[in-house]
Amino acid sequence: MTKNEFMSQLKNKLRKLPHQEYIDAINYYEQYFEDAEDEQKALDKLQSPDKIAARILADFADEAPAKSSFKVLWIIILSLFAAPIAIPIAIVLGFIAIAIIVTIIAIVSAVILSGGAIIFVGIVGGIASLSFIFSSFPTTLYFVGVGLLTLSLGVLFIHYTICLIKIIFKGLNKLFSKILRRSSK
């Protein structure tokens, strides 16, 4: 076997290697033959191209997991450095979400209590107007009418507030459904 035949067989066997490793292996054996004084003695010292290629491929296979484990280690190191920033941001976002929920509950409660207060004023106004029944009947009718008007406005206020709350919650439900569908893709 000649040097050219040896190198040709070795090149064919090492085609599976990544380009840089392929070049390095071929350059090593080219240099080996250039440094040797007698080409035939150098060929006799070497194993067959099949065995050399098998050993090189096995060595590369052993190194490949080390490279991927280095990537995992690198990601872990970056995660540790990012944690002092990411954890406080996550905590702040959690508190903002809680604040928004508490604010919505407070607004809904205030609106419903306002409607309840209007109804209460209507009832109290209607009852208080009965005290005028013996002094001035038209004044009593006026205050009874104002009380009933206030009572009906309070009922309408609460009714439309509840309808508005239902619409808001349906919209929020659709929004969160879209967000969850997009995040699950």
Image (spheres, helix red, strand yellow):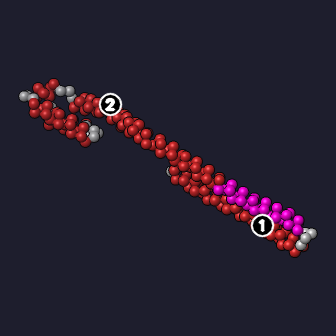
Q: Which region of the structure is painted magenta?
A: 107-132
Residue 43 falls in which quadrant of the image? top left
Closest to the observer, 39 or 114? 114
Q: Horizontal and vertical percent for residue 94?
A: 54, 46
Q: Residue 119 carries which label?
A: none
Q: Does the magenta stretch include residue 126?
A: yes
On screen, residue 52 above or below 117: above
Q: In this view, does 149 lie to the left or right of 13?
A: right
Q: Residue at x 88, y 68 (%)?
A: 132
- Asked if disc 1 and disc 2 are in contact, CB closer than 8 Å, the reply is no
Left or right for 159, reference 15: right
**Looking at the image, can residue 77 be seen?**
yes
How packed mark 1 is, by other alpha carbons closer than 10 Å (few <14, some 14-19, many 20 or more), is: many
Please name the residue that numbered disc 1 is placed on: 150
Q: Looking at this view, name the residue that lies furthest to the right.
A: 134
* Residue at mark 2: 62
Tell me what residue is drawn at x 61 percent, y 59 percent.
171
Q: In this view, does 129 lie above or below 179?
A: below
The amino acid pointed to by label 1 is Thr
Q: Is residue 166 visible?
A: no
x and y percent of residue 106 in the render?
Answer: 65, 53
| Closer to the camera in the image, 39 or 184 | 184
